[in-house]
């Protein structure tokens, strides 16, 4: 396993991060503990979760994922010092979390305390803002004019950002969190947070967790440039596009227990004709080079120098083992060229 520095922090994280959002919905406590054990035994020291999880988010499973990780840590307290534990505060739009309100400074401390209790730990290594308060082009909102930027008040946004940083600073000084990071953010948001921290002597964001995969590359090059020049770790989530890049949904297949059989608040916006055409092409290319489509997709994410750690998830141990093996693969220039020929043909397969 290879390790990278997490942005401007002093944390070293594995090139693979175990995403855990299936714990509590598709995975039981026994499943979760088995995955966590396997991950740590194979060199993964970076574990990502969120108060929102399990997914799809429901009131009945709110906080369930953190609770399962906490149960694992309680049973094996020696593991805490071995891992970098990351979680997130949810933002606006989820009715059962703070009445659907946005992230405000007055919620930070209590949300951290609740996560600490569920995780059964004294501190969180990386505390992330799950999504911005303003409308932003994440998920399926990156097509033209879906987001109306004229409706956003930049002064109000900056005031809220500053207050959030001040609240995070208080929690860092109290020893409850070590570092803070962003998720589903844009170049504008990154620059504002970095500059506000610098101007006011407040904690600097050290990472950005955004969607990135063979079917979603909107972050290159603008957001990636902002991360690189501001020393933020780039952490791709959903590198398999909620599983579609594994090829398991080709030809209308819907395997029992798979993500696409569950209702999602954003809808199944990746279920588009061009997505399936792209996946079919990647699957054929992967087979010709002796690997699975999942492995091809993950190895492609991993090959970029600006990717700090790729977040993978699995509902079955076999999937976790298959996915982890992808990070031992080196893609030849010939194979990369073939991948990018497909990518050019299906550059924006969904929007």
Image (spheres, grey):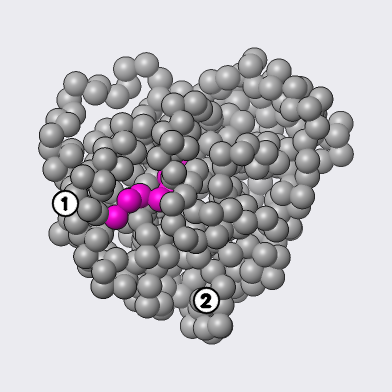
Question: Is disc 2 in contact with disc 1, using a CB cutoff of under 8 Å?
Answer: no
Q: Position of residue 333 (x, y in %)?
A: 78, 27
Q: CA distance from mark 2 to mark 1?
A: 31 Å
Residue 115, quarter of picture: bottom left
Task: Provide the residue span drawn in magenta.
Answer: 203-210
Query: Residue at point 56% right, 58% down?
Result: 13
Q: Name the side, left or right, on which 58 lies relative to 292.
A: left
Residue 49 covered by magenta stretch: no
Whether residue 316 is visible, yes or no, is yes
**Which of these two is toward me, 114 or 261?**
114
Q: Position of residue 226 (x, y in %)?
A: 41, 33
Q: Position of residue 350 (x, y in %)?
A: 51, 24
Residue 117, quarter of picture: bottom left
Q: Which residue is mark 2?
A: 81
Query: Residue at point 54% right, 69% down?
Result: 83
Query: Residue at point 65% right, 32% down?
Result: 252
Residue 166, quarter of picture: bottom left
Q: Position of residue 1 (x, y in %)?
A: 70, 58
**Which of these two is toward me, 293 or 308?**
308
Residue 266's place in the image compared with 124, above or below, is above
Mark 1 is surrounded, within 10 Å at the Cα level, by few (under 14), some (14 to 19) or many (20 or more) other residues, namely some
Mark 2 is surrounded, within 10 Å at the Cα level, by few (under 14), some (14 to 19) or many (20 or more) other residues, namely few
Whether residue 241 is visible, yes or no, is no
Tag 1's secondary structure? Answer: helix
Tag 2's secondary structure? Answer: helix
The mark nearer the N terminus, 2 or 1, is 2
Query: Residue at point 60% right, 26% down?
Result: 275
Residue 66's place in the image compared with 310, above or below, is below
Residue 283's place in the image compared with 148, above or below, is below
Q: Which residue is mark 1?
A: 163
SS majority, magenta: strand
């Amino acid at each position: 396993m290879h390790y990278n520095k997490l942005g401007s922090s002093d944390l070293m994280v594995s090139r693979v991060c175990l995403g855990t959002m299936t714990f509590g919905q598709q995975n039981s406590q026994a499943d979760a503990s088995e995955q966590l054990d396997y991950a740590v035994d194979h060199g993964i020291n970076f574990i990502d979760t969120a108060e929102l999880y399990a997914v799809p988010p429901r009131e009945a499973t709110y906080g369930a994922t953190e609770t399962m990780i906490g149960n694992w840590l309680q049973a094996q307290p020696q593991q805490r010092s071995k891992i970098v534990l990351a979680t997130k505060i949810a933002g606006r739009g989820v009715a059962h979390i703070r009445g659907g309100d946005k992230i405000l400074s007055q919620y930070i401390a209590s949300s951290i305390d609740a996560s600490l209790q569920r995780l059964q730990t004294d501190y969180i290594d990386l505390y992330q803002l799950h999504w911005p308060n303003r409308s932003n082009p994440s998920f399926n909102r990156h097509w033209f004019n879906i987001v109306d930027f004229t409706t956003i008040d930049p002064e109000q946004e900056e005031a809220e950002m500053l207050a959030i940083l001040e609240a995070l600073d208080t929690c860092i000084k109290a020893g409850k969190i070590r570092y803070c990071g962003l998720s589903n953010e844009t170049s504008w948001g990154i620059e504002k947070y970095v500059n506000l921290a610098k101007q006011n002597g407040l904690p600097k964001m050290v990472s950005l967790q955004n969607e990135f995969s063979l079917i979603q590359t909107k972050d290159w090059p603008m957001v990636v440039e902002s991360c690189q020049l501001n020393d933020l770790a780039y952490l791709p989530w959903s590198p398999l596009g909620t599983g579609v890049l594994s090829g398991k949904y080709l030809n209308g297949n819907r395997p029992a227990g798979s993500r696409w059989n569950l209702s999602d608040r954003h809808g199944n916006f990746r279920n588009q004709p061009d997505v399936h055409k792209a996946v079919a092409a990647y699957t054929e290319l992967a087979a010709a080079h002796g690997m699975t489509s999942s492995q091809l997709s993950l190895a492609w994410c991993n090959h970029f120098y600006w990717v700090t750690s790729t977040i993978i998830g699995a509902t079955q141990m076999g999937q976790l083992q298959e996915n982890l093996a992808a990070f031992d693969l080196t893609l030849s220039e010939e194979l990369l060229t073939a991948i990018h020929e497909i990518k050019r043909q299906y550059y924006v397969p969904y929007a």
